[in-house]
Image (cartoon, grey):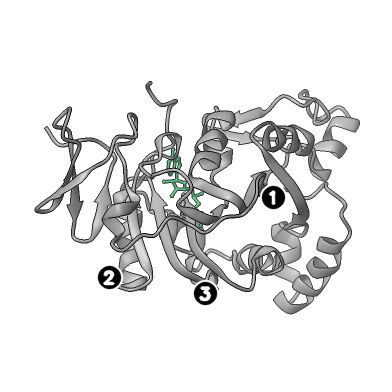
Amino acid sequence: MTSPQICDYENSTYRTDFWEGRGREYEDRAERIALQKLLPTHGTRLLEIGAGFGRLSNIYTMYEQVIILDYSLSQLQFAQETYGRGGRFIYVAADAYQLPFRAGIADGVSMIRVIHHMREADRVLAEVRRVIADGGRFILEHANKRNLKAMLRYAVGQQDWNPYDLTPHEFVALNIDFHPQYMQEQLKQHAFQIEQRIPVSFLRLRSLKQRLPIEALLNVERVLQQSQWMVSPSIFIQSRAVGEPAPLPAIHHPDELFVAPQSHLPLQREGETLVEVTSGQRWAIRDGIYDFKAPLD
Ligand SMILES: C[S@@+](CC[C@H](N)C(=O)[O-])C[C@H]1O[C@@H](n2cnc3c(N)ncnc32)[C@H](O)[C@@H]1O
C-alpha cells in the first residue's frame, strides 16, 4: 500500500529558521509544561514519532529507552549530534504511515507537532495502535481548528471556513487543523481511551510575546492550561491503548525491534543492513541511524 503524501523536512532549516533564536521560547516551554503533566514517572520504551531534530527528546528522561523517529535523515543527524550514539537513544528514519516495528514494542508513544502534516490521520493512528502495547500511554498534540482566533474571525465574517465543522481544515498544503471532537473520535475508533486533555499555547501572539516577560507569560499559560477551555491553538491529549497491560517483548538488541515496513516480516542483520529474506529487500543502517525510508536497490 502506498503512503499518502509526506511533508518532507529533508535538508530543511526547521531548527534554525523556526526555533533557535526565533522568539519561540514561550511555545517550547508551554509545550514542556503540558508534557510534564502527561508523562509517567517511569516507562520502558518511548517512541517519539516525527521527533525532528530532537527538540523535545530530552524531556523523556523517565523512559529507559527512547526511539527518535523522523522521516528526515538530516533532522535525525542533528538529533544524533545532540544526544550521541550508543546510549538510551535509537534513531530511525521512517514513514509514520508505515512504521518498521514489531507490534507492541513501546509502552509510550509521543507525537508533537506532527499530525498536522497528515491528511490521513486515521492511517497513522492505526500504525501507532499497532506498535504500542496494550495499556501504553500515547501523547498526541494536534493543531486546533476550533481556536479562539478562528472563532472570532468567523463570527465577524472575516473567515469563510467554519471552525465548528468537524472536517479537518487544510489551510496550506499538508498543514491541517483538526477539530478537538474529531480527534477524540479518531482516537476512540482506534482503541485509545482518552485520559487527559490540555489546551496549550494560548498566548502565541507576537505582540504579547514582545511586551511581556517570558515568566509572566508562562504563569498565565499554566492557569489557562488548567482551564480545560479547548480554544487554544494547540491541544495535547493523553490516552491509553485499550487492553490489559502486559510486559513488553524482551529486546536484547535494537535490531530486534524491527520488521519490514509493509509486510511486517522479520529481518536479519547482514553487515550494516537489515534484510527481509523472502523478498531480498534490505534497509541500510547509516552511521547508527536505521534508514527505512526506502529499501536499497
Ligand atoms: C513541525 S516538525 C516537529 C518536530 C518535533 N516534533 C518538534 O515538535 O520539534 C514535523 C516533523 O514531522 C516529520 N514528519 C512529517 N511527516 C512524517 C511522516 N510521514 N513520517 C515521519 N515523520 C514525519 C517531519 O520530518 C518533521 O521533522
Q: Distance between the residues labelled 3 and 1?
A: 20 Å
Residue 137: x and y, percent? 62, 55
Q: Nearer the viewer, residue 152 or 201?
A: 201
Q: How far apart are marks 2 and 1 (CA)?
A: 31 Å
Name the residue at the left extreme. Answer: 271
Residue 199: x and y, percent? 78, 54
Residue 177: x and y, percent? 66, 36
Which mark identifies residue 85? 2
Give left or right: position of 283 versus 77: left
Judge the density around disc 3: few (<14), some (14-19), many (≥20) Cα neighbours within 10 Å: some
Which mark identifies residue 227? none
Q: Nearer the viewer, residue 274 or 227?
A: 274
Q: Could you tell me which secondary element the residue under label 1 belongs to? A: strand
Q: In which quadrant will I find the C terminus?
A: top left
Residue located 60% across and 65% down the image: 28
- Sequence-first tag of 3 and 1: 3
Q: How far apart are marks 3 and 2 (CA)?
A: 16 Å
Report the number of discs: 3
Judge the density around disc 1: few (<14), some (14-19), many (≥20) Cα neighbours within 10 Å: many
Give left or right: position of 289 versus 71: left
Q: In this view, does 117 lie above or below 113?
A: above
- Sequence-first tag of 3 and 2: 3
Q: Is residue 297 above or below residue 54?
A: above
- Residue that label 3 marks: 61
Q: Could you tell me which secondary element the residue under label 2 belongs to? A: loop
Disc 3 + disc 2, Cβ < 8 Å: no
Give left or right: position of 292 versus 65: left
Residue 183: x and y, percent? 71, 36
